[in-house]
């Protein structure tokens, strides 16, 4: 398993990105039976026909397309891209994918189960009120990624240590935290309707 991040492409600066990408792919082409994972890849494969696409962005996508074509032709590796913005991908890139898988955050029931597991020492009556508050704010709870939910649970535990956590504290804390979530309310509506697709 080889993981490549945005910083690996930018190791020599933005103006040398295409050169650095060629070096990386040249090394990858030497490997056999490997899974290559490229994270946050959207900046390098943006749609070239977009009105706001600048010359540098178009050249970057074209360079990446050439490298991918050659790499995938060898059939020696499994290539996985991860992104939060597949809608900006150039169609020439997505046509080369065998599968597009949407990985959504854990659902509300899963998050409440994690909450219950973590709050085992809480009196049952308080836990029931907390769960009720979580369910009544399901539209917000739904948007938390796994890491965001883990952080939120830690914050609530900290609040509970400072003072007895009342049922009225949880809902406002949820709404306040929602402003900083990775997936905003508008984007979540699009995500919620999305499905995996075989190309």
Image (cartoon, rainbow, N blue to C red):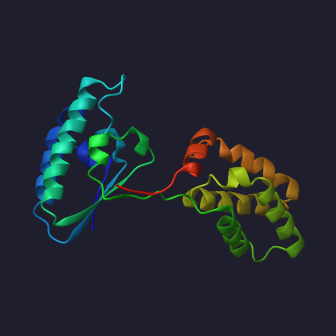
- Quadrant in the picture for the C terminus: bottom left
Q: Residue furthest right?
A: 125
Q: How many marks?
A: 0
Q: Residue at x 33, y 47 (%)?
A: 41
Camera-nearest residue between 118 and 184 = 184
Q: Nearer the viewer, residue 122 or 192?
A: 192
Tell me if residue 13 can be seen: no
What's the residue at 47%, 56% (across, down)?
102
Quadrant of the image containing the N terminus: bottom left
What residue is at 42 percent from the left and 41 percent from the top? 87
Please tell me whether residue 171 is drawn above or below residue 129 in the rendered image. Answer: above
- Provide residue 51's location: percent of width, then percent of height: 36, 22
The extreme front residue here reads: 199
Q: Is residue 188 left or right of residue 164?
A: left
User: Can I make out residue 1 in this image?
Assistant: yes
Rendered location of residue 28, percent (x, y) = 16, 59
Is residue 79 rendered to the left or right of residue 124?
left
Residue 59 vs residue 164: left or right? left
Q: Is residue 117 left or right of residue 74?
A: right
Q: Nearer the viewer, residue 177 or 138?
A: 138
Pick the front one: 14 or 92: 92
Residue 58 x/y as whole percent = 25, 30
When the figure is inspected, residue 144 is found, relative to residue 128, above or below; the finding is above
The image shows residue 79 at horizontal and vertical percentages of 27, 60
Q: Quadrant of residue 72?
A: bottom left
Name the residue located 75 percent from the left edge and 77 percent from the top edge: 120
């Amino acid at each position: 398993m080889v993981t490549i991040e945005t910083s690996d492409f930018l190791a020599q600066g933005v103006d040398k990105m295409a050169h650095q990408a060629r070096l990386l792919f040249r090394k990858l082409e030497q490997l056999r039976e490997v899974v290559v994972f490229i994270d946050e890849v959207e900046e390098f494969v943006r749609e070239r026909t977009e009105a706001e696409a600048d010359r540098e962005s178009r050249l970057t996508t074209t360079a990446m397309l050439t490298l991918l074509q050659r790499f995938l032709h060898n059939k020696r590796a499994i290539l996985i891209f991860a992104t939060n913005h597949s809608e900006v991908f150039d169609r020439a890139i997505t046509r080369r994918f065998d599968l597009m898988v949407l990985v959504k955050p854990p659902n509300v029931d899963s998050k409440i189960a994690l909450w219950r597991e973590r709050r085992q020492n809480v009196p049952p009556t308080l836990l029931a009120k907390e769960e009720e508050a979580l369910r009544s704010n399901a539209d917000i709870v739904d948007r938390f990624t796994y890491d965001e939910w883990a952080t939120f649970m830690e914050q609530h535990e900290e609040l509970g240590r400072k003072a007895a956590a009342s049922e009225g504290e949880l809902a406002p804390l949820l709404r306040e935290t929602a402003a900083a979530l990775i997936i905003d309310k508008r984007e979540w509506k699009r995500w919620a309707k999305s499905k995996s697709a075989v190309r």
